[in-house]
Amino acid sequence: MRRRLTKDTTIGDLLLMDPEIGAVLSSIGMHCIGCPSARGETLEQAAEVHGLDVDDLIEDLKGFMGA
């Protein structure tokens, strides 16, 4: 069963859902996804740190993942 992608989804969980998503995150400036502490961040926290709108980020990720 596929987990729902929300602003509370952690980077670690996102990478478990789709390991290829790391390349997408890197392409939008989230180069720290390999850091152990970054894996515990939620999408909302990561978007805030990188100056991104979390809702737009989620929609883009869903599009990539075909969700």
Image (cartoon, grey):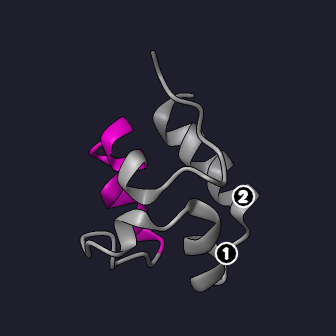
Query: Magenta region: which residues?
Result: 14-28
Q: Which mark is residue 56?
A: 2
As drawn, is 17 to the left or to the right of 48? left
Residue 26's spot in the image, x, y percent?
A: 36, 70
Work out whether 21 lies above or below 18. below
Instruction: Identify the secondary structure beneath mark 2.
Output: helix
Res 18 visible: no
Residue at the image position 44 percent from the left and 78 percent from the top? 29
**How many numbered tags mark residues here?**
2
Q: As shown in the figure, which amino acid type bears the numbered disc 2?
A: Asp
The residue closer to the viewer here, 3 or 47, is 3
Residue 25's spot in the image, x, y percent?
A: 42, 64
Q: Are marks 1 and 2 in contact (CB under 8 Å)?
A: yes
Instruction: Identify the secondary structure beneath mark 1.
Output: loop
Residue 65's spot in the image, x, y percent?
A: 47, 35
Is 11 included in the stretch rendered in magenta?
no
Residue 40's spot in the image, x, y percent?
A: 41, 65
Q: Which mark is residue 2?
A: none
Query: How far apart are labels 1 and 2 at the CA level?
Result: 8 Å
Quadrant of the image occupied by residue 1: top left
As drawn, is 19 to the left or to the right of 10? left
Residue at the image position 67 percent from the left and 47 percent from the top? 59
Q: As shown in the figure, which amino acid type bears the numbered disc 1?
A: Leu
According to the image, label 1 marks what residue? 52
State the predominant SS element of the stretch in magenta.
helix
Residue at the image position 54 percent from the left and 47 percent from the top? 61
Which quadrant of the rendered structure holds the C terminus?
top right
Residue at the image position 29 percent from the left and 46 percent from the top? 20
Crowd tier of the residue under label 2, counting other residues whose Cα lies within 10 Å: few below 14, some 14–19, many 20 or above: few
Is 21 included in the stretch rendered in magenta?
yes
Quadrant of the image occupied by residue 5: top right
